[in-house]
Amino acid sequence: MRTSIRSAAVAATAVSLALLVTACGGGEKDDAKDTGKTAAPSATASASTTAAPPAKALSAAELDKLVVEQADLPGHQVQKAKPADLVTSDAVSTDKPSCKPIADGMSFLSAGTPAASAHRKAIEVPKTDGASASPEDALGALAAPVTSVTLGSYEGQGAQEAFASLKTAGTDCAGGFTLIGGGEKTKITKVAPETVAAGDEALAWTITTDMDGEPFVTKLVVFRAGNTLASFSTLSFGGEVKALPKAVIDAQAAKLG
């Protein structure tokens, strides 16, 4: 049992989410010819004077006030990620470079190069009738969906670029890829798109991993709100997540506005 749980955690997150079990300028001007008239400002010049300034990333402290908390998610246990839960982006790689953004999303990381991040773990609390927990209830709790929530804030067009890389990864990696992390190689066999609506733009996938010949099914959702990306990676040690974490997504979207 311990071996299967460890293997499932490695498959779903490559490195970090195995620890979740403990929680059960100026424009141009046209040249003026010698006609006695001043050349009109070009469209480029006019546009540059009204263009919005480049987006400025939020700080880690600002993001930490925007990420979902316990009060936002009834029916869930929400915890702040511990330093030991987290890895750096260079600790996760893939055999196909274009698949790296999806691997990052599965590993408590924001795609691309965020200036700051914030993290939470949201564990769905199984409903009970108030009676003493039975062994079956304990197994049900172990199989409850666990969602890692990651907010990443970016300078300039960084969020749009990171989202575009995820969109490319969803296409390039539909047939699978190998995820490498923590000294383990994990075979992702399928990345299937799902439908989701949140933020300015959103993507979602069902991700199937080969675990000793058995499918291990997880969900990954990413949406962009301005220059912030919100990522949600959901797993169950029961072996299959059947639905997107809608309550978590909706609560996070509401906080980001």
Image (spheres, rainbow, N blue to C red):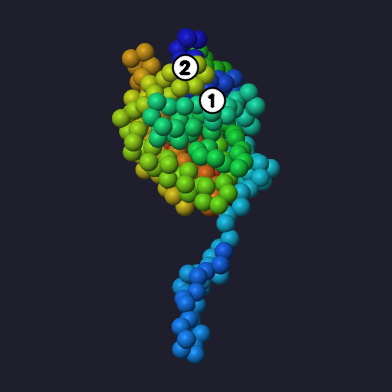
| 13 or 238, nearer to the observer | 13
Seen in the image, is 210 located left or right of residue 130? Answer: left
Seen in the image, is 151 located left or right of residue 187? Answer: right
Amino acid at the residue labelled 2: Glu
Question: x%, y% of residue 257?
Answer: 56, 53
On screen, 137 above or below 79?
Answer: above
On screen, 66 above or below 209?
Answer: below
Residue at x-position 51% and y-position 39%: 112
Where disc 2 sits, the SS reads strand
Where disc 1 sits, the SS reads helix
| 169 or 204, nearer to the observer | 169
Residue at x-position 48% and y-position 81%: 32
Residue 184: mark: 2
Question: x%, y% of residue 100?
Answer: 44, 32
Q: How many marks?
A: 2
Amino acid at the residue labelled 1: Ala
Residue 208: mark: none
Question: x%, y% of residue 159?
Answer: 51, 47
Direction front: furthest residue? 34
Which residue is identified by label 1? 91
On screen, 240 above or below 65?
Answer: above
Quarter of image, res 149? top right
Question: x%, y% of residue 125?
Answer: 54, 28
Residue 162 in sight from this viewpoint: yes
Residue at x-position 58% and y-position 54%: 55
- The residues tagged by marks 2 and 1 sit, at their Cα atoms, a distance apart of 11 Å
Using a 10 Å C-alpha cutoff, classify the residue at mark 1 as few (fewer than 14 neighbours), some (14 to 19) or many (20 or more).
some
